[in-house]
């Protein structure tokens, strides 16, 4: 066993926090069965209590025919009523970037669930996370390893920057492969609301629907009137989130010149973030306005932008622009998850 994993296990068993790599973003992990350890997550992040945490579990190791039983055994300490739908999704997407909300078992700490009767479970596929979980013999409660409301970390360096003033052990697993947080699907209220995506991610509604043999899967806006919006079941559902400090705005392709805020029109330093196809006529216009423009070209594939987005937002923030102009993303559903994060970053930016 690597010395670092052994050290991380020691810290976790003693009730400390360890930042861990996952394929989505880095997490700030604590023993999910230790209330004091879980409280430390909230105080370290500055996260309001009542925001539930995801419990991360090890993967099933048995062969295909046995895997229903193997997943059931792994879920049993956390989940009451393990439905066929839950097992179908575990088999289809775990280990991987999917969190499933299920009715919680009695023993799950209220600090983990935010006092709710449900629990979010995820089995991450990053090999370092899996190695740690396999040896930990328990669940790790882990939110993204950033201060509350800020950009999620996609490298060990980001985590160190976030908590520079605190001694937190960081397991470096390299840059995150997916780059945005897991898809969250709520199976716990199917009798009233059906299956609901609470947060879009790399596992799409269509993929979940296919794994559930065509069952209807709703997006949150389709049922928003029925959800209690006063209760932040999903902190990622707050409209301002994942936010850079520099004010950022989205503009429709080809129309930067016509929508540029007047505050940015004199000798300002502007980051112009756009796809390669975007017309250069805007650049000529910006030059005539004596705006100091720095261009950043976006990747044309949605999964590639997801991988790069948070590092790009952090970099833009550090380069001290007066504003960030971001070309709006294409409308097709492949862009839903990254669009969701970008939209929240825009709303929360500038504060
Ligand atoms: O990809 C991810 O999911 C990352 C990595 C570290 O696993 N984790 C992550 O955690 O994004 P966090 O805490 O930043 O976001 C988890 C979201 C929160 O918005 C929380 O409200 C929601 O999951 N959540 C957790 N348990 C829930 C529950 N029982 N019901 C509804 N939402 C829940
Ligand atoms: Mg988060």
Image: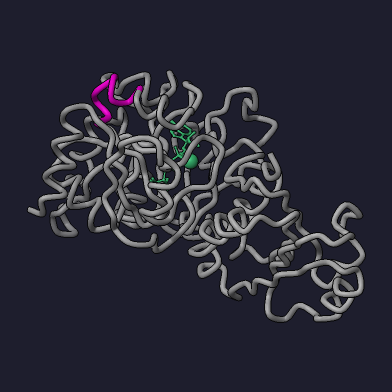
Q: In screen coordinates, is 41 left or right of 136?
A: right
Q: Quadrant of the C terminus?
A: top right
Q: In screen coordinates, is 247 left or right of 118?
A: right
Quarter holding residue 145: top left
Residue at the spot x=55%, y=67% of the render? Answer: 305
| Residue 174, percent from left and from top | 33, 61
Q: In screen coordinates, is 174 left or right of 228?
A: left
Q: Is residue 37 magenta?
A: yes
- Give the mark count: 0
Residue at the spot x=15%, y=52% of the render? Answer: 66
| Residue 151, percent from left and from top | 53, 47
Residue at the spot x=62%, y=59% of the render? Answer: 319
Q: Which residues are magenta?
A: 31-39
Q: Is residue 337 magenta?
A: no
Can residue 209 be spotted in the picture? no
| Residue 114, percent from left and from top | 44, 22
């Amino acid at each position: 066993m690597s010395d670092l994993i052994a050290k991380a296990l020691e810290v976790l068993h003693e009730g400390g926090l360890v930042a861990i790599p996952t394929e989505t973003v880095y997490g700030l992990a604590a023993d999910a069965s230790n209330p004091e350890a879980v409280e430390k997550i909230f105080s370290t992040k500055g996260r309001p209590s009542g925001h539930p945490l995801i419990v991360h579990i090890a993967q099933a190791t048995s062969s295909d025919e046995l895997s229903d039983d193997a997943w059931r055994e792994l879920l049993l300490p956390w989940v009451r009523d393990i439905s066929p739908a839950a097992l179908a999704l575990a088999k289809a997407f775990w280990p991987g970037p999917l969190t499933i909300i299920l009715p919680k078992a009695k023993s799950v700490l209220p600090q983990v669930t935010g006092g709710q009767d449900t629990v979010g479970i995820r089995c991450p596929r990053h090999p370092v996370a899996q190695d740690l979980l396999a040896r930990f013999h328990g669940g790790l409660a882990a939110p993204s390893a950033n201060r509350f409301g800020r950009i999620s970390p996609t490298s060990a360096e980001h985590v160190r920057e976030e908590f520079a003033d605190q001694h937190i052990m960081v397991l470096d697993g390299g840059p995150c492969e997916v780059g945005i947080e897991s898809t969250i699907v709520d199976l716990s209220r199917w009798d009233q609301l059906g299956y609901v995506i609470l947060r879009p991610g790399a596992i799409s509604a269509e993929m979940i629907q296919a794994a559930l043999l065509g069952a209807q899967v709703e997006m949150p806006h389709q049922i928003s009137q029925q959800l209690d919006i006063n209760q932040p079941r999903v902190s990622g559902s707050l409209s301002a989130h994942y936010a850079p400090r520099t004010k950022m705005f989205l503009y429709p392709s080809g129309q930067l010149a016509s929508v540029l805020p007047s505050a940015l029109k004199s000798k300002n330093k502007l980051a112009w973030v756009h796809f390669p196809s975007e017309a250069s006529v805007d650049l000529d216009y910006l030059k005539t306005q004596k705006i100091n423009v720095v261009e950043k070209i976006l990747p044309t594939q949605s999964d590639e932008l997801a991988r790069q987005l948070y590092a790009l937002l952090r970099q833009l923030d550090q380069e001290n622009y007066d504003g960030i102009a971001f070309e709006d993303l294409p409308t097709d559903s492949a862009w839903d998850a990254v669009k969701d994060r970008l939209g929240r970053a825009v709303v929360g930016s500038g504060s």
